[in-house]
Image (cartoon, coloured by chain):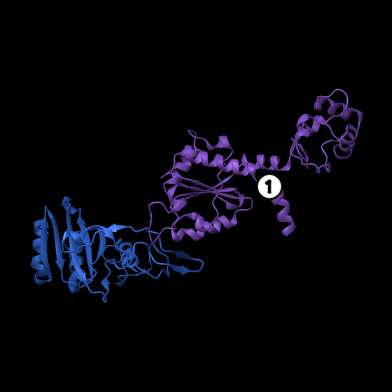
């Protein structure tokens, strides 16, 4: 398992921006322009044959806005090694689809598109996966209110704002004091 | 009326001598319907007074009921509403709209331990056109909402709706962009059942509440009203 990390570092050098190791978990932050190349190398050469998950983070208020996170796993040669690869993505750019490497990525990427609104290059089936076609919002974005927004698609679906009655009480991630972090009603809109 | 059948009627009505309506029939207010247990509803008797003489009664029987007890069984006098409501409430055919974990409890209610068929509601129909009561069991998402409404619209009248559990009643714990905040936003609900999910006993109690409601409804009046307006 150490060897796969060193192999990657030898092969991609400067493109691997950061390596974090925490209780045996390895997280690489990589150069967005070479991310797909690195992921493909992991599959082809390092036998990371199992894509566990793809997720995306919304760093609202900081640039770049998105972070893509790939969780990959190898079961070959009983290595059972888990690797996390991250890269940042600016709001106006598209991510590269990895569905040609791991076919299962198609649904993960459709979900990311549906919930976050991040689009993918070369994704064959680029429909929404949970919400209906024509729903105008991306509900997992930080600037989308938990209560939702009203929308209307005649004969398909409609949405209304849910009554929250002062809630929910959420924390805000900030480096300021606990007074600022304290859970409080934070309604957007 | 043949002599034979008149004898038969005497035997049934319990009066060896004169033809006399039973006490029960007298106590019931008009309009009266002669309701035969073999399922045939004969024409409604146009008797408006409860003080009918024996003559009137025998005459009306001769007119309306050429009666053969061997073939037609016993006679029950009742009101149209009572008869219709009794039939309706004891054979509710549910449309199971199972959308989440409540549906598991709904299945449990139908199974042997709780046995919803004791209340005549065991015939789960997956065709809305054969159903009387829609049991909305589970979380109604906005994506599903109009489909539920459409199934409801396909059910023939008379129809009722039970909102089973917190989600169907009010959105439950999902104060969210994705969940309809209670199915009563789209369709009229007769009985709300609390619980997350409700126990089968709660569902059965809800069903019995619905039976009470049906029992009190003015079915025949509504029926004739809808015929007039149509």
* Image quadrant assignment for residue B13: top right
> From the viewer's perspective, is A122 left or right of B157?
left
Residue plotted at (20% across, 73% down): A64
Residue under label 1, please give it: B219
**Which quadrant, please, contains the C terminus of chain B?**
bottom right
Q: Secondary structure at mark 1?
A: helix
- The 10 Å Cα crowd at callout 1, few under 14, some 14 to 19, many 20 or more, is some
Q: Looking at the rendering, which quadrant does residue A151 occupy?
A: bottom left
Q: Quadrant of the N terminus of chain B?
A: top right
In the orientation shown, which residue stands out farthest toward the bottom?
Answer: A92
Q: Is residue B147 left or right of residue B230?
A: left
| Residue drawn at x 66%, y 42% as measured from the top left | B85
Q: Position of residue B167 (x, y in %)?
A: 43, 51
Q: Quadrant of residue B24?
A: top right
Chain A image colour: blue
Shade of chain B as shown in the rendered figure: purple
The reply to whether residue B230 is in sight is: no
Q: Is residue A116 left or right of residue A61?
A: right
Image x and y of residue A41, in percent: 18, 66
């Amino acid at each position: 398992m150490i060897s796969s990390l060193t192999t990657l570092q030898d092969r991609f050098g400067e493109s691997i921006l950061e390596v974090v190791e925490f209780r045996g978990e390895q997280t690489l932050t990589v150069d967005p322009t070479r991310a797909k190349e690195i992921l493909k190398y992991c599959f082809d050469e390092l036998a990371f044959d199992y894509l566990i998950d793809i997720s995306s983070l919304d760093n609202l208020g900081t640039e770049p806005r998105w972070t893509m996170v790939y969780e990959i796993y190898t079961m070959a040669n009983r290595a059972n090694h888990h690797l996390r690869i991250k890269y940042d993505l600016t709001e106006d750019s598209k991510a590269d689809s990895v569905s040609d490497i791991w076919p299962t990525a198609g649904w993960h990427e459709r979900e990311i598109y549906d919930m976050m609104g991040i689009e993918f290059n070369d994704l064959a089936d680029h429909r929404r996966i949970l919400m209906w076609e024509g729903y105008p919002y991306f509900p997992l974005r930080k600037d989308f209110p938990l209560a939702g927004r009203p929308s209307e698609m005649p004969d398909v679906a409609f949405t209304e704002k849910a009554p929250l009655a002062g809630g929910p009480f959420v924390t805000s991630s900030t480096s300021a004091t606990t007074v600022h972090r304290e859970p409080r009603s934070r309604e957007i809109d | 009326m043949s002599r034979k059948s008149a004898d038969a009627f005497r035997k049934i009505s319990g009066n060896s001598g004169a033809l006399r309506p039973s006490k029960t029939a007298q106590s019931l207010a008009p309009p009266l319907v002669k309701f035969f247990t073999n399922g045939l509803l004969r024409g409604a008797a146009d008797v408006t007074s409860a003080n009918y003489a024996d003559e009137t009664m025998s005459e009306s029987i001769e007119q309306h009921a050429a009666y053969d007890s061997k073939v037609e069984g016993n006679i029950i006098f009742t009101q149209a509403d009572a008869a219709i409501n009794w039939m309706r409430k004891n054979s509710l055919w549910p449309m199971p709209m199972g959308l989440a974990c409540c549906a598991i409890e709904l299945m449990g209610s139908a199974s042997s331990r709780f046995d919803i068929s004791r209340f005549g509601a065991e015939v789960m129909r997956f065709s809305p056109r054969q159903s009387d009561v829609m049991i909305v069991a589970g979380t109604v998402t906005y994506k599903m909402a109009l489909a539920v409404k459409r199934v409801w619209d396909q059910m023939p009248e008379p129809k009722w709706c039970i909102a089973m559990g917190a989600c169907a009643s009010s959105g439950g714990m999902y104060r969210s962009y994705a969940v309809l905040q209670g199915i009563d936003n789209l369709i009229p609900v007769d009985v709300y059942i609390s619980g997350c999910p409700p126990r089968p006993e709660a569902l059965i109690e809800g069903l019995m509440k619905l039976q009470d409601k049906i029992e009190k409804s003015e079915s025949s009046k509504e029926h004739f009203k809808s015929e007039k307006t149509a």
